[in-house]
Image (cartoon, rainbow, N blue to C red):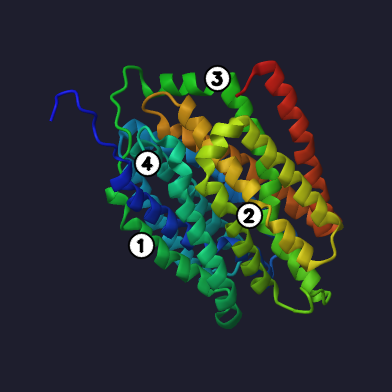
Amino acid sequence: MAANAPTASPVVPHRSLLSAMYFFTFLALSAVIPYLTLYLDSVGFSGAQIGVLLGVGPVIGLFATPFWTGVADASRRHSLVLGVAIGMVALVYALVPFVRSFEMMLVAFVAIALFASHLLPTEDSAAMHMLGESKNRYGEVRFWGTVGWGLGGLLFGWLYNFSGLVWMFWICSSLLLIALSLVSRLRFEQVTQRESFFTNLRELTNRTPLRLFLLATMLAAIGLSTHNHYLSLLLNELSQANATVFGWAASAASLMGVVVVIGVLSELPVMRFSEGLLNRLGTRGLLLVSLLVISSRNLLYAVNNEIWVILLLQALHGLTFALLWVGGVSFMARNAPKGLSATAQGLFTAAQVGVGYAIGNLVGGLLIDVAGVRGMFAATGSVVLAGIVLVIVLDRRYRIF
């Protein structure tokens, strides 16, 4: 072989491993997240208490995500940090069904948030490194996370009608252990930094376009969080009012399973063809489309009285979360200094799952007590709509993208 022959791309041998990691991680999460509000409501917590429980995780994640991803980058022990996190989340979830008081449930949610906050950004950091020069093909491996989420939605909504919601925690823990078994095979960027970690971190966070992009991400997340956590309450309200889907009556848990499946089916083509979408629309286009659809969907929830309309609107889900996530991971990977790949992804996750979700979950829960579920969706949809105008104005002045 000639000395100057090109090195074979590492993408092919790694894609199956990355796909499996995303698949089992999201399959595990799909057993809990769509049904968490229903479970908390079923054990007697108020709307305000549910808002606090759902809001405390993102608040903790705001600090825990950049802390743990920073530790991983600074120590270059990414696999250890990720493995401990998955193991601890599996353990705490397994114990949640035995908790009854609000105070102890709050402790459990804080513990979960402390360790779960950096699972996805650390996995994304590994994916971006292992994909090498083919980073725009990230969506093709993240696609299998969407498949896992959809398979869980198809299965678990039906299962919980017979087994009860308490089983969701033990199923999630078991599936996380499978993901844990794959961690040691992941590979991460290993860079001996000329500058200190904190010098590079200051360089990253002082970039104005990055700060403004994280602000836009936060606004989108406010609308996303209310959809993710409070749509089940709207479905429950409609099902109790004898609303049907073409004459078919169903429980809120079954309907949430259908919602998850529809959302996944809408995400699959977006993830599969994300490389083309990025090339055609760019990060700016992906973000603006995501904001517009999030706002429109929440505002339509506020005036809707039919379950079938909610299911129809869920078909737009791929244009919300998937576009935001693909665009955000790509933007942060391009703007991260060497050696700060995991940290950059952690900042993106902190802005979305930390700040944005915390505001959406906490304020959403309080608004439900004051204005009802529909009033809450009207308010959050209006906030995201105002965010679209803000992003356009800021981009013209500061050239974010």
Above or below, 39 relative to 267: below
Label whose residue precedes the other's in the sequence (2 or 3): 2
Q: Nearer the viewer, mark 2 or mark 3?
A: 3
Q: Secondary structure at mark 4?
A: helix
Q: Residue at x 46, y 70 (%)?
A: 170
Q: Residue at x 79, y 69 (%)?
A: 237
Q: How many residues crowd mark 3 within 10 Å: few (<14), some (14–19), many (20+)?
A: few
Above or below, 253 relative to 188: below
Spot occupied by residue 390 in the image (x, y as percentages of width and height):
75, 28
Total numbered badges shown on the rendered structure? 4
Spot occupied by residue 311 in the image (x, y as percentages of width and height):
72, 63
Q: Which residue is mark 3?
A: 207
Question: Is residue 87 at least partly visible in the picture?
Answer: yes
Q: Secondary structure at mark 1?
A: helix
Above or below, 180 relative to 251: above
- Residue placed most toward the observer, 225 or 311: 311
Q: Which residue is mark 2?
A: 54
At label 2, the amino acid type is: Leu
Distance from label 2 to label 3 (Cα)?
31 Å
Q: Which residue is mark 1?
A: 178
